[in-house]
Image: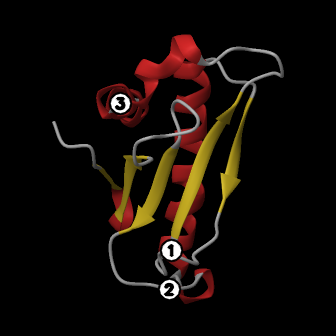
Amino acid sequence: MSARVDLAGGWFLKPHAAPCPVAGWCVLELSRTCATLDALTPAEARDMGDHIRRVSAAMRSVTGCARVYLLAFAEAHRQVHLHLVPRHESGRSEEHTSELQSPYVISYAVFCLKKK
């Protein structure tokens, strides 16, 4: 199984590169070359919003996190991509969730959402 999960509308999801500071951290990226959010087509922007919602729901379901942070920097990699980071309540150890960085778990969570 590939670490990359292809999504509708030319988007894909992949786990953050190792070593990852937070288990379950994913990156949502547009397949075509596009450097800025304002250069997205209306359809790409709608798909991005839907993917953010669905991936966030999958992350919360799989990791048990309280919420999902969304980050966009586009400094080192000048391509439209968003980081989705599970955020657990303070004081919770994430050691037992290290297996969540696996692309298999992320792929399965996204697959489950596609079936709904």
Q: Residues within 10 Å of mark 2 (few under 14, many from 20)?
A: some
Name which of mark 1 and mark 2 comes first in the sequence: 2
Which element is circle 2 on?
A: loop
Which residue is located at x 64 percent, y 70 percent? 73
> Quadrant location of the C terminus?
top left
Rendered image: mark on residue 80: 1
Q: Is residue 104 above or below residue 10?
A: above
Which element is circle 3 on?
A: helix
Q: Amino acid at mark 1?
A: Val
Position of residue 27 measured from the top left corner of the image (x, y, whole percent): 48, 53
Position of residue 63 measured from the top left corner of the image (x, y, whole percent): 57, 21
Q: State left or right for residue 91 relative to residue 87.
A: right
For mark 3, what is the residue?
115
Q: State left or right for residue 103 relative to residue 84.
A: left
Q: Amino acid at mark 2?
A: Ala
Which of the pair 111/20 is nearer the observer?
20
Position of residue 25 measured from the top left corner of the image (x, y, whole percent): 53, 40
Q: Residues within 10 Å of mark 1 (few under 14, many from 20)?
A: many
Rendered image: mark on residue 35: 2
Which of the pair 114/71 is nearer the observer?
71
Q: Is residue 58 above or below residue 84?
A: above
Q: Amino acid at mark 3?
A: Lys
Q: Is residue 33 above or below residue 77?
A: below
Which residue is located at x 51 percent, y 51 percent? 51
